[in-house]
Amino acid sequence: MKKLTCLLLSLFIAGSVLAGCGNSGGKVSPTASNATQQTEPIKIGMLEDLSGDFSLCGTYKTHAMELAVKEINESGGLLGRQLELIAPDCQSDNQRYQEMARKLILDDQVDVIMGGFSSASREAIRPIMEENKTLYFYNNQYEGGVASHYTFCTGAVPEHQVMPLMEYMIKNYGPRVYTIAADYNFGQLTAQWVKKATEEYGGEVVGEEFLPLSVSQFSSSIDKIQKANPDVLVVLLTGVTQSSFYGQWATAGMDVPIATTINIAQGYEHKRFDPPACANMFVTAQFVEELDTPEAVDFVKRFHELYPDEPYVGMEAAAQYTGMMLYAEAVKKAGTTETEAVIKALESGISVDSPSGKVSIYGPTHHAVMDIWIVYSDENHNISFKQKYDQIVPDWLEKEKGVDLTKESPNKQFTP
């Protein structure tokens, strides 16, 4: 009996070991998984618009990402692995943004997602990133205020653009400000920032108008502006359709300087439109193709060597390229593509020498520290630089809203 008991016990132990080594629910062992991971590419998901209303900027943003991936791969990749870019065309359609975001996450299993042009497209997909705990880079100028554990913003925000722009314009041209803006969250929230900055610098908003993205005729709006008689006109119109405003404004012949955070630098209207459509226009930007610094000149040269038919290298190309390089540096520091480790590395203050100069992630807000220029277009659309602001820290969320994303994430967008 004693021998029989020992035999049965031995058979039970052997069976248990075999069962553990056999069916593992389709999963490989940790050692095998790690070995496989070391040879597989790091998957970069990108959501941009190669067609539709925002394709003008979506195209050069796509090319900037392709340039960054090409350069990283040619230098040996990340952690000894090559990068694979997966980039469906979102067609300037927010529903498609959502569909493609889910595909990248669930089917393609990307390590990070970058992209989105309009704030509406960003807000369409950001909840999907949160739900799936996916690292997301929004590499675009926007109205600010997003506070999310998984979202990092490398484009300029109102602290970089609106505050210095309104200070400069009121000081040099006068206190009466009129704002015309696109009627969605970018235009509405940026207009709030314009009002905040105008009042802070002793000015007065004498008129505001918000127009749907489909509007292409602006005669009634121009009549309202003429009646208000402002010292400064702030223009926050976006997309191909609304850009027809500038030609109509030039025809009206009003001698009022235009202040903007998007035109010239983003949609290169000074190249696309005949003078004097962009005459007497001021824009705050971290980058334009004409920027005469060693970093900017070299970036534009490399960009046009790869894409000689691209008509302009806009500021969002620089932001997109910079976002990819910041991610690369964070992966190197973390030693892994694991999301939480990369986020921790980013929050530590990762910085890169970008096309626009030094850019760093400010950990508490997940936004970027950067240099900003006041760019001017004259009646012949010649570009000059009026003033530079060094290394503006985007800390409004932290100082006024108490946000510190290194400790806790409210996962919301704050407004002024």
Image (spheres, grey):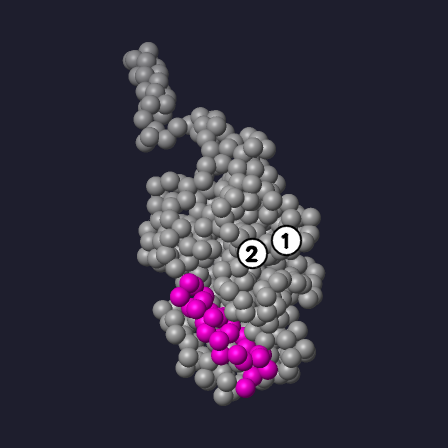
Q: What amino acid is labelled 2 in the image?
A: Met
Specify the segment rendered in magenta.
229-256
**Marks 2 and 1 in Cβ contact (< 8 Å):** yes
> Which of 27/39 is in front?
39
For residue 33, say whether it is visible: yes
Badge 2 crowding class, 10 Å Cα cut-off, few under 14, some 14 to 19, many 20 or more, is: many
At 50% from the left and 29% from the top, the residue drawn is 38
| Marking on residue 20 | none
| Marking on residue 315 | 2
Q: For numbered disc 1, what is the local secondary structure?
A: loop
Q: Is residue 298 left or right of residue 91?
A: right
At 56% from the left and 73% from the top, the residue drawn is 258
Q: Quadrant of residue 123?
A: bottom left
Measured as percent of width and height from the top left, residue 232 is found at: 58, 79
What is the CA distance from the residue labelled 2 to the residue labelled 1?
9 Å
Badge 1 crowding class, 10 Å Cα cut-off, few under 14, some 14 to 19, many 20 or more, is: many
Q: Earlier in the sequence, mark 2 or mark 1?
A: 2
The residue tagged 1 is: 356
Measured as percent of width and height from the top left, residue 272 is found at: 49, 60
- 297 above or below 9? below
Measured as percent of width and height from the top left, residue 25 is found at: 32, 31
Measured as percent of width and height from the top left, residue 153 is found at: 53, 56
Q: Is residue 220 left or right of residue 283?
A: left
Q: Is residue 207 left or right of residue 286?
A: left
Does the segment drawn in magenta span residue 250? Answer: yes
At 57% from the left and 49% from the top, the residue drawn is 322
Q: What amino acid is labelled 1 in the image?
A: Ser
